Amino acid sequence: MAHSPTATPFADLDAFTALPRTAGLALSADGTRLVTTVATLSADATRWRGALWEVDPTGERPARRLTRSSAAESSPVFAPDGTLLFTSARPDPDAGAAEDTPAALWALPPVGEARVVGTRPGGVSAPLVARTSNRVVVTSATMPGADDAEDGPTSDAARRKARKEKGVTAVLHARVPVRYWDSDLGPDEPRFLTAELPGAEPAAGTRDTLRWRDLTPSPGLRHREASAALTPDGAELVTTEVVAQPRGDQHVRLVAISTTDGSVRVLADDPQREFGAVALSPDGRHVAALAESRSTPQQPPSVRLVVVAVDGSGVREVAPERQFWGARPQWGPGSDELFLAADDHGRAPVVRVDVAGGEVVRLTGDHGAYGDLQVSPDGAHVYAVRSAVDAPPAVVRLDARTPGQEPQHLPGPAPVVELPGTLTEVTTTAADGTRVRAWLALPSGACAEKPAALLLWVHGGPLSSWNSWSWRWNPWLAVARGYAVLLPDPGLSTGYGAEFLARGWGAWGAEPYTDLMALTDAALERDDLDATRTAAMGGSFGGYVANWIAGHTDRFRAIVTHASLWSLRGFGGTTDAPWYWSREMTPAMVAANDPSAHAADITTPVLVIHGDKDFRVPIGEGLALWWALNEHWDGDPQDLPHRFLYFPDENHWVLTPQHAILWYETVFAFLATHVHGVDPLVPELLR
């Protein structure tokens, strides 16, 4: 018997979808202003729109909204004079722009209205501002062969217009990749553009939009999703750069680009390591970055913290005995210490690292996962966005010197939400003697007399961890419907050391699977869980595991597999990053770990979910799985227990609000039918 829903937003999918979502932080140079982005539903509930909010760093005043428009605002960053820069596609009232304009760079002074200061035909994104000058750098999609001209036959606008007028969408590629996550690449390319920010508000009736200079006129794919930072004086842009290698491979190096003439200096180039998460020290002498080692069929990657000399004199590992998965380092004001948060046993605590000696001090003592760190200019405080499996993102303040502290929550723009249950942990010993753990979200009222059904939820990645809040994969929606949700970190999970990762590397169907079964067995020893009513689900790599489970056990009453790998033989060459997966997926690995080889053994009802715009796990995987389930069903077609939820316009995650609601409605209806035995249900809009 299912538990009745509890009176929280999680019991109502519309109410859950309407909850405000906080993300990102920007701190002013003087430390007095802290800005975050909050996404809320549009009036028609079909999209989320971001707005900028100011949070008081002292925690005394309530948050106040800074921007309001029909378009979204994002990417806030402060200029040295206190002006807040951000990007938005809202119409420019001074230019009479239409509603469908590309994102422009806006400037909001400490007093006054926001105005457009920079535009491009392909839009602008990811603004960076120098610490001690008015140098600004943005990323802008630009057509090949376009120059700095604002008009004329060689301009970006002219090249775009020519293709549009002729109805041409074709792209000629010279190398991989051709797609990335959910986007076709080309024909335009990401370029870095630079300019000097204007000063005061221009005189009435005049405009002072920036005149951009192209720093990377022939980037190819060198700067796709680059991590970048400006030197304090704005003289150089330090950024990651993709380097093509033979046989379709690539690696990522670290370079410095002059903002004066576009000349490039290589700071760190190691084909066996890829650099990312770039941060420049306040004294301008060093770059902090993460260096991910190149994996092999036998060895998973590792992520180390490194410091790179800006003068090109070398790379040094800091705290080399540790790994820093998911971290984004931030410098202290003295350029002698770093602050970062990384995966650690189902958490992501904030640590302070001494650059010279490598000493690591853990500042947070709770189970939270922290991100978007900002260090106050006096080095006394660290501001962050904190979430946890049981807490949505919120802005907090930490003391930069106190180990093991609890965070101070600052008055934020999003309300506190009541959960429909509680969070605990499950630990056990795996078959090889390794200790493994999981979070367990329990519904209120679950007890021996009224045990809850168990839903095993496998994370994606595969190099990932259940340690933070997810709006997309939220266990509390299931908890509100009476399910206990088990969130395990099996082999291949990050935050448990190199050996733990290596246990599942190249052996996806071995330790990850056996770890999950061991943790499921351990959870079901509790008398408040019902071992006769269980289901399993997962997305991406979690979907792969769900498919593997379906072909190897019938212990679950239902399985949900989203954006999942089905045929490893077909996946490698069709995904958007084939060079990465080929490092692990040898012919022997594929043969030993291919779920499609066990299609005939699947007896559990399976709900397949896939989006057609998913380029990381292409739609062919979902179609092949759906055919296999039909091909091996020899009963009456009317009695086929499997279902396929197909989204023609969605990607790897299913992001639009109403489709996300339909996703959960379909999943919960499928689970109710097969776990609780209720009559088959179909969401109203899918009937």
Image (spheres, rainbow, N blue to C red):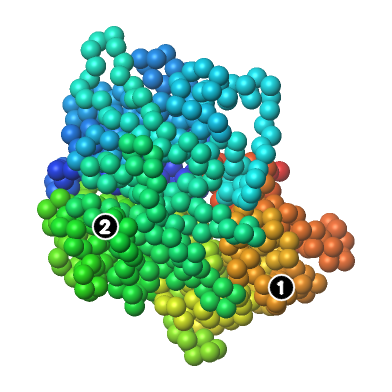
| Residue placed most toward the observer, 360 or 306 | 306
Q: Which residue is mark 2?
A: 286
Q: Of helix, strand and loop, which one carries label 2? A: strand
Q: Residue at x 46, y 81 (%)?
A: 499
Q: Which residue is mark 1?
A: 587
463 lies left or right of 127: right
Residue 503 x %, y %: 53, 81
242 lies left or right of 567: left
Q: Residue at x 76, y 73 (%)?
A: 598
Residue 319 x %, y %: 30, 73
> Dot 1 surroundings within 10 Å: few (below 14), some, or many (20 or more)?
few
Q: Can the viewer see residue 466?
A: no
Residue 287: which numbered mark, if any? Answer: none
19 lies left or right of 504: left
The amino acid beneath tag 2 is His
The amino acid beneath tag 1 is Pro
**Earlier-in-chain disc, 2 versus 1:** 2
Q: Of helix, strand and loop, which one carries label 1? A: helix
